[in-house]
Amino acid sequence: MRHFLEVDDLTVQELKLVLELATATNPPKSLDGQGVALIFEKPSGRTRNSMEMAVVQLGGHPMYIKPEELGIDSRETAEDVVRVMAGYHTVLAARVFDHGRLERMAATNSMPIVNLLSDLAHPMQALADLLTIEQEIGLSKVNKVAYVGDSNNVWRSLAIGCSMLGIDTSVASPAGHGPNSVDLERILAGGGSIQVTDDPHEAVQEADVVYTDVWTSMGQEEEMSQRLDAFGRFTVNSALMAGANAGSIFMHCLPAHRGQEVTDDVIESPQSKVFVQAHNRMHSARGLLSWIVGEVSQHG
């Protein structure tokens, strides 16, 4: 039973295969007559639309499920929910607050579990990011991917994916918001190097990709004032982009708080690939589902 809770749940070859499957213009209807349960504890327009359409393009039926419809760990344990859903669906994909809940679901080995976002990881976003880099630059041609801002779940999954593909990364964060030793060990295990700094200008030197995310993620609203102060000099603006390599691109997983982590002139510039990224969420989801359903049919 294969699950996708973080990018390195795939081998390097499997990651490359998923990205290849994502580019198929007429994919086989590998989910024909099958359901995919989409559990959303946290709402998201991009995730819901991209996943539902990816399932439809593979011939399956997506089922959007609100948290109050299940009451996970209040009405029914996470483990029991998965065992029930396994009787209806081929794959269960969930967007949750607590990564541990996904791990408990996967531990039942009742059906493949896909992480649509947790507090620790956002591997589906990383797949879309890597697909975008491949299309815009070529993964084998990238010198460095620079991340400016909070060392959050988006950064972690992207850095792991880059490292697996031999791409060096850098991360610039204010004190108290940088990576921890566990994250760094996991990233370095992939094979790529990582530069950690509190200077955004140092981070973007010789970078082909400059990436940022919101300073205050969903669930951190009470920290907004403190975060605005801490991240004040980490805005990606045209001056910062000028320090990256010629031909570099700007990326953001969206939604963007314009004027905070990125300026309008950058996000609206020709360097910006944020909407390509957003659209690639659907294509990369289709690639991941194609792979995981193939694993089910091959070993099920």
Image: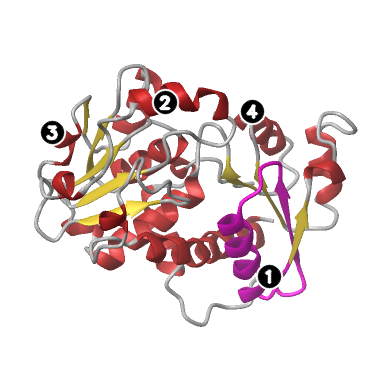
Residue 295 spot, x, y in % from top left: 59, 57
Q: Is residue 226 above or below residue 91?
A: above
Amino acid type assigned to the residue bearing label 4 in the image: Gly
User: What x and y, as percent, mark residue 156?
Assistant: 40, 35
Mark nearest the camera among 4 and 1 is 4
- Which residue is identified by label 3? 202
Q: Write down the residue under mark 2.
A: 227
Q: Which residues are magenta?
A: 32-61
Q: Amino acid at mark 2?
A: Arg
As for residue 172 lying within the magenta part, the answer is: no
Q: Indicate which disc, 1 or 3, sits on the residue closer to the N terminus.
A: 1
Indicate which label's residue lies in the foreground, 4 or 2: 2
- Cβ–Cβ under 8 Å for marks 1 and 3: no
Marked residue nearer the N-terminal end (3 or 4): 4
* Residue 142 appears in the rendering: yes
User: Mark 4 or mark 2: which comes first in sequence?
Assistant: 4
Mark 1: which amino acid? Leu
The residue at 40%/64% (across/down) is 275
SS at circle 1: loop
Report how far apart the C-alphas of labels 1 and 3 lie in the structure.
46 Å
Q: Seen in the image, is 275 located left or right of residue 291? A: left
Q: Mark 1 and mark 2: span between their CA atoms?
A: 43 Å
Disc 4 crowd rating (10 Å Cα; few below 14, some 14-19, many 20+) is: few
12 or 208, which lies in front? Answer: 208
Of the 4 image quadrants, the one containing the C terminus is bottom right
Give the left or right position of residue 54, taking residue 151 as reference. Answer: right
Q: Which residue is mark 1?
A: 31
Pointer 4: what residue? 100
Q: Is residue 282 above or below residue 83?
A: below
Indicate the secondary structure of the residue bearing disc 3.
helix
Nearer mark to the viewer, of 2 and 3: 2
Give the distance between the C-alpha atoms of the residues marked 4 and 2, in whole angstroms: 26 Å
